[in-house]
Image: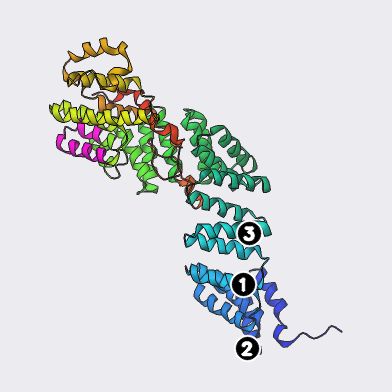
């Protein structure tokens, strides 16, 4: 004869059976009977009831029940772990850390305690302690989630190289984890290592051909290199799985823009804007398309909402013949970007066209100071010939003399300087702002530059693709060494589109 179970534990097997079957209503009815018979002293019944409460979103009630379990069995680390978990879900991270530490004293070899402690420390911004706890968790037992949280810490600290090392170790441990492969591919894209990025994204798509994040990232990379048709084929696959994705329609719209199908581009971008009305990148791209179609009023309304690149806004104001706001915008652009000489050059051209030659000369001299500083620091000295030529022409028109850096760059251009000085100023009017539009148009496909890998993996891809300019922050981007020259080089593509 089988031994009789104690009255406190008599229905535990039945409670467990209904719980794992997710038959919660029957489970709660049995728990109620068991607690009535035992006068609330059955630890397992209370524990399962608390788990069901948490699943129903009643976090506070589950916390109280888990605390009752801890009172019934104070030496159980599992009860303390559940108490700490409920505190964490309520946003009480410091209290959760205290309970997890108490649980760690009862069980020092539980990787889950160390992992959750690391997560709590991340929310309290104590990254050093978080890294220690996550490394301890990996020593006890390796898990994909622990690797991802450790990589997240390095990304929050801005150390992309260390994050890549962590994700590489994670991929070696779990080579078929598509989320790890996709995140590692995105990180390589930020550093401009497109070959490695494509390799990892391709591996991710091998294991999961419908992986939306990998498809979007791979398509964005193809779009960056001008392969619009191949990128569109990728986006068609993604549209089946996530048809209401704002980044997807944003990328599709910019593919049409790259193919010069502007009406289709506007249609796709407006759909993306409908799905995400407050995404400034979509508004920026939509303004860029309107600007290319010479619809300056529409472009101004969109670009002024979030003026991430004041140069396009300045170009729009110039074509709207709004000199006062144009001047104020130029002044604001100079204050916001204190290292880019192109901003001062555009301002100098604008002032020269307005007849204020004295102020234009001051801006030209300020541009010269920034250029000399870059030359002394041996950084970003590969200036675009068109930029140099325009600066020489403006210096000649303003009679700035032969001591400018631009005059020393090439003696071969002196002949063109003399001939250009005799031309009327109207021929120089669109130079400064046209460069900004030419740059934006030539780099419209380069929307993987600012892809953010944020704390959550989803956030990394949801920001793709980024606007044509390199934005700060979004551990987002190309090599820092090449980011600034790109701004100067890309302007020479399609300057005619803006010449009005």
Q: CA distance from mark 3 to mark 1?
A: 15 Å
Q: Secondary structure at mark 1?
A: helix
Q: CA distance from mark 1 to mark 2?
A: 30 Å
Q: Is residue 480 left or right of residue 51?
A: left
Q: Is residue 109 left or right of residue 101?
A: right
The structure residue drawn at horizontal position 60% and vertical position 40%, both measured from the top left corner, is 205
Task: Give the residue furthest to the left.
Answer: 355
Instruction: Select label 2 or label 3 by which is in front.
Output: 3
> In the image, is residue 162 part of the stretch drawn in magenta?
no
Q: Secondary structure at mark 3?
A: helix
Between disc 2 and disc 3, whose residue precedes? 2
Q: Is residue 98 left or right of residue 423?
A: right
Between disc 3 and disc 1, whose residue precedes? 1
Whether residue 285 is visible to the viewer of this picture, yes or no, is yes
Instruction: Select label 1 or label 2 by which is in front.
Output: 1
Of 159 and 496, nearer the camera is: 159
In this view, 5 is above or below 215: below
Q: Where residue 432 sits: x, y (%)?
A: 26, 27
Residue interval drawn in magenta: 314-335
Of 343 and 31, nearer the camera is: 343
Residue 324, image quadrant? top left
Q: Which mark is residue 136?
A: 3
Q: Where does label 1 land, which residue?
A: 103
The structure residue drawn at horizontal position 55% and vertical position 46%, both measured from the top left corner, is 162
Is there a contact, CB below 8 Å, between mark 3 and mark 1?
A: no
Q: Which mark is residue 36?
A: 2
Q: CA distance from mark 2 to mark 3?
A: 43 Å
Between disc 1 and disc 2, whose residue precedes? 2
The structure residue drawn at horizontal position 22% and vertical position 21%, both measured from the top left corner, is 395
Of 262 and 108, nearer the camera is: 108
């Amino acid at each position: 004869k089988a031994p009789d179970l104690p009255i406190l534990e008599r229905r535990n097997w039945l409670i467990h059976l209904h719980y794992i079957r997710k038959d919660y209503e029957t489970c709660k009815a049995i728990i109620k009977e068991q607690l009535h018979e035992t006068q609330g002293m059955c630890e397992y019944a209370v524990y399962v009831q608390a788990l069901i409460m948490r699943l129903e979103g009643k976090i506070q009630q589950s916390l109280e029940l888990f605390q009752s379990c801890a009172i019934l069995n104070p030496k159980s680390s599992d009860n303390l772990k559940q108490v700490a978990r409920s505190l964490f879900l309520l946003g009480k991270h410091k209290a959760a850390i205290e309970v997890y530490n108490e649980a760690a004293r009862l069980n020092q070899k539980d990787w889950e305690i160390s992992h959750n402690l690391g997560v709590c420390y991340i929310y309290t911004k104590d990254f050093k302690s978080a890294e220690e706890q996550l490394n301890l968790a990996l020593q006890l037992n390796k898990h994909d989630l622990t690797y991802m949280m450790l990589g997240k810490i390095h990304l929050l600290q801005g150390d992309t190289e260390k994050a890549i090392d962590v994700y590489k170790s994670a991929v070696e441990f779990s080579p078929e984890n598509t989320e790890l492969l996709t995140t590692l591919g995105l990180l390589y894209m930020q550093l401009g290592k497109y070959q490695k990025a494509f390799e990892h994204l391709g591996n991710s798509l091998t294991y999961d051909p419908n992986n939306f994040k990998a498809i979007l990232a791979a398509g964005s990379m193809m779009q960056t290199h001008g392969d619009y048709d191949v990128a569109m084929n990728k986006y068609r696959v993604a549209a089946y799985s996530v048809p209401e994705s704002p980044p997807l329609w944003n990328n599709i719209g910019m593919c049409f823009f790259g193919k010069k199908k502007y009406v289709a581009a506007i249609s796709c971008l407006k759909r993306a804007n409908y799905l995400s009305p407050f995404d400034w990148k979509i508004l920026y791209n939509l303004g860029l398309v309107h600007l290319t179609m010479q619809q300056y009023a529409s472009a101004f309304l969109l670009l002024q909402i979030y003026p991430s690149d004041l140069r396009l806004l300045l170009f729009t104001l110039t074509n709207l013949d709004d000199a006062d706001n144009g001047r104020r915008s130029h002044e604001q652009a100079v204050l916001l970007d204190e290292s880019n000489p192109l901003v001062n050059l555009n301002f100098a051209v604008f002032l020269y066209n307005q007849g204020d030659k004295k102020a234009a000369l001051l801006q030209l001299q300020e541009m010269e100071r920034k250029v000399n500083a870059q030359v002394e620091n041996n950084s970003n000295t590969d200036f675009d010939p068109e930029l140099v030529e325009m600066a020489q022409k403006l210096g000649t028109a303003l009679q700035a003399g032969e001591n400018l850096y631009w005059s020393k760059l090439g003696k071969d251009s002196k002949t063109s300087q003399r001939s250009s000085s005799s031309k009327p100023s109207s021929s120089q009017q669109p130079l400064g702002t046209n460069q900004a539009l030419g740059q934006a148009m030539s780099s419209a496909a380069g929307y993987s530059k600012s892809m953010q890998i944020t704390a959550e993996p989803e956030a990394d891809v949801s920001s793709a693709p980024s606007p044509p300019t390199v934005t700060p922050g979004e551990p987002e981007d190309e090599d820092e060494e090449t980011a600034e020259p790109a701004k100067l080089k890309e302007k020479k593509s399609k300057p005619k589109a803006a010449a009005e």
